Amino acid sequence: SSFLSSDLDKLSVLGHGNGGTVYKVRHRRTSQIHALKLVRADSDPAARRQLLREVEILRRASDSPHIVRCHGVAETPSGDMTILMEYMDLGTLDSLLKSEGSEFFTESILAGIARQHGRKIIHRDIKPSNLLVNAAMEVKIADFGVGKIMCRTLDACNSYVGTCAYMSPERFDPDSYGGNYDGYAADVWSLGLTLLELFMGHFPFLPPGQRPNWSSLMCAICFGDPPPLPEGSSEEFRSFIECCLQKDSSRRWTAAQLLSHPFVLKAVV
Ligand code: ATP
Ligand code: MG
């Protein structure tokens, strides 16, 4: 499916990413609101390839209720590439945590997120800033930036510290933490870390306010103790987090097992 960018009115900028900008747009005829990601014609070829890959994945997964719906792709007359997507009105979990604080993320909301994402998805880049939310508290994965996650030089790595922060121990060190990881296990780690961050209000492996750097992160994740389980939380929540944050990937619960964990079963449907 494709669309005419001339049918869309740009209302505001929702955010900037690697090589692209996302706008809130209104379709003139239907008045529907969508999100439009635009990668300019003169941008880095890598960003354009990245967008094509993203479109391909979004399209293949377009029947999943847990992935942002892709309405179509188009190239503008000036060569800009655009994807028209479902608009997620509450933005990312990351921005919601910043604006509303961790009080917003009650255990029942966290259990709802866990239930929605306790399915087999190989994403490899699950973190608060890649999960979009709408007013119905549906949480959907955006951004299949698959290609750009692997970092080759230390420099590139440092600019992706934010991404690496949610990487599981076996991705830093496959030999020590269960080398035959299948990607699903890595997502379970990232999901657990994301839920814990929403509950605590800061990145769990570091004290509040401390900016991660590559070596402190790798040390904390691979050699440090697991983050302390949050006080004042239910036993089910603590247990769920523990099951997700097993350092050894072979001892970590699978997505299927997590779906029948008491914390998830308790979630109001
Ligand atoms: P990267 O380039 O590394 O993928 P990113 O994920 O931040 O970075 P984009 O995917 O381009 O970049 O998105 C930029 C921002 O636009 C997001 O952080 C989010 O705030 C907003 N955004 C993206 N898609 C939507 C959407 N469908 N609905 C609402 N807001 C969105
Ligand atoms: Mg993105």
Image: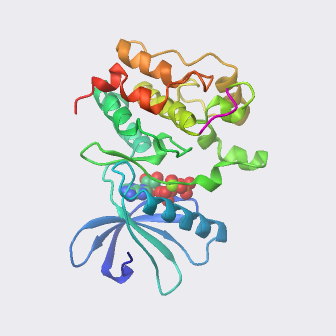
Q: What stretch is highlighted in magenta?
A: 178-182
Indicate whether 5 appears above or below 31.
below
- Considering depth in this image, is 178 or 199 the residue closer to the camera? 178
Indicate whether 60 appears above or below 214.
below
Residue 52 in sight in this render: yes
The residue depicted at 37 percent of the width and 22 percent of the height is 261
Judge from the rendering whether residue 176 lies leftward or rightward of residue 165; answer left or right.
Answer: right
Residue 117 x, y percent position in the rendering: 40, 38
**Which of the 4 quarters of the picture holds residue 211?**
top right
Residue 8 x, y percent position in the rendering: 32, 76
Q: How is the image coloured?
A: rainbow
Q: Which residue lies furthest to the bottom in this view?
A: 77
Report if residue 32 lies within the magenta region.
no
Judge from the rendering whether residue 172 lies leftward or rightward of residue 153; answer left or right.
Answer: left
Instruction: Count all numbered tags in the image, as a single digit.
Output: 0
Q: Main secondary structure of the magenta part?
A: loop
The residue depicted at 61 percent of the width and 77 percent of the height is 42
Q: Quadrant of the N terminus?
A: bottom left
- Considering depth in this image, is 125 or 104 the residue closer to the camera? 125
Q: Residue furthest right?
A: 153
Report if residue 181 lies within the magenta region.
yes
**Which of the 4 quarters of the picture holds residue 7?**
bottom left
The residue depicted at 29 percent of the width and 48 percent of the height is 134
The residue depicted at 50 percent of the width and 64 percent of the height is 56
